[in-house]
Image (cartoon, rainbow, N blue to C red):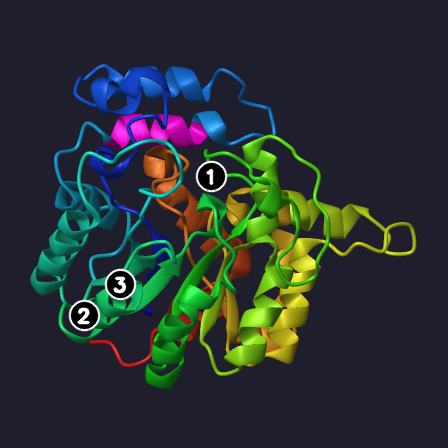
Amino acid sequence: MGIITNCHTHIFTNDIVPVRFLPFGLVQKLGKYRFSRRFGRFLKNIRPRKDNDFFDRVASFINIGAFQSQEEIFELLKGFYPEESRFVVLSMDMEFMGAGAVPNDLRTQLEELADLKKKYPEQIFPFVCVDPRREGIADLVKEHIEEKGFQGIKLYPPLGYYPFDARLDPVFEFTQAKKIPVMAHCSRGGVYFRGMITKDMLTHPITGEKFRKRPNKHFSDHFIDPANYAYVLEKFPELKLCLAHFGGGSEWDKYLETSWEESQEKSWFSVILDLMKKHPHVYADTSFTLHDPELHPLLKVILKDPKIRQRVLYGSDFYMVELMRYERSFSVNLRGYLGEEDYFQIAETNPAAFLGDVP
């Protein structure tokens, strides 16, 4: 039996969630009480069949709010996997999303992760979150990679920026030169920009495409579009980049259900496949999207392509969709469906190549 590496997990507590993420600061207030987990399940079941993960994510924030530290959440996560399993832990920076102040600053979150890395050096691989609007972001990245034991960086563009933002160039220069992995959120939905959509934002900075003003949740899709990474990869062709969530379940459905003869707009899933075939260091992971077992056959098929097979990563997205109830079953069910060879290809072999020189 091989060693499982879950390449996409979160263990942050709700003290890094902005106070206006929910009205009246409910994330922080409800997270203080034991009943919060039951309330979270109530939220999750309000619209269980809707193609909208908002309530799932809110429930997760509230549920995890009952935990006092990232270490407590990490201990919970570890318990769902064999003892020697390893975990990429992705930090989050929500200070600039336009939802108010965060109770705890970014450095506090990162310092706690650095301490966990010292305590679990062979099991936890922390990634430092990157936002181009944070002053001194390149220095912050270098400090945590070179001095604090962090192994990669995390991008979350729907918070209100494009991945090709020029302020990220020094970060990409550093990560490319050092072969440091980059994980980027790449599916619709999730946490999104809450600020004002300005006139300047209605034009794509590179293509000049004009956008109509829509609710923030949907407008933020422009930041996430995987086509944006073509511009990043033109500048940094050796960048080791994982497009997390593989475009999202709705884009996998679009690929399966839509003829390109009828619609010339490719699904994000297809765009990501094209990027993977063109660029030898582009990866994608199974997190969130592959919790839908109806999509497992498509994963099985694309793993037959030798170019794609080497660069699909196992990830679960714990705990962003309240997976405390489903974390073990997701891993076991996917493993049972794929079989040992394919499962350990994405859960052991490919993560080792993506992470590079780690303990």
- Residue 234 lies, with reference to residue 130, above or below; the image says below
Where residue 178 sits: x, y (%)? 32, 83
Would residue 80 appear left or right of 7 to someone viewing this image?
A: left
**Label 1 Cα neighbours within 10 Å, binned few <14 / some 14-19 / many ≥20:** many
Q: State whether residue 54 appears in this view.
A: yes
Residue toward you, 48 or 297? 48
Residue that lies at the very extreme toward the right in this rendered image: 261
Q: Which is closer to the viewer, label 1 or label 3?
A: 3
Residue at left offset 59%, top offset 46%: 201
**Label 3 Cα neighbours within 10 Å, binned few <14 / some 14-19 / many ≥20:** few
Where residue 136 sits: x, y (%)? 26, 63
Residue 246 counted in the magenta span: no
Amino acid type, residue under disc 3 in the picture? Gly
Kindly indicate whether the residue at mark 3 contacts the one at mark 1 (C-beta within 8 angstroms). Answer: no
Answer with the quarter of the image where residue 61 lies.
top left
Residue at left offset 41%, top offset 66%: 168
The earlier-in-sequence mark between 1 and 2 is: 2
Amino acid type, residue under disc 2 in the picture? Glu
Q: CA distance from mark 1 to mark 3?
A: 21 Å
Q: Which mark is residue 193?
A: 1
Q: Which mark is residue 293?
A: none
**Label 2 Cα neighbours within 10 Å, binned few <14 / some 14-19 / many ≥20:** few
Quadrant placement of the N terminus: bottom left
Q: CA distance from mark 3 to mark 2?
A: 11 Å
Q: Which residue is mark 3?
A: 136
- Name the secondary structure under disc 3: loop
Quadrant placement of the C terminus: bottom left
Residue at left offset 86%, top offset 51%: 263
Q: Which residue is mark 2?
A: 143
The earlier-in-sequence mark between 3 and 2 is: 3
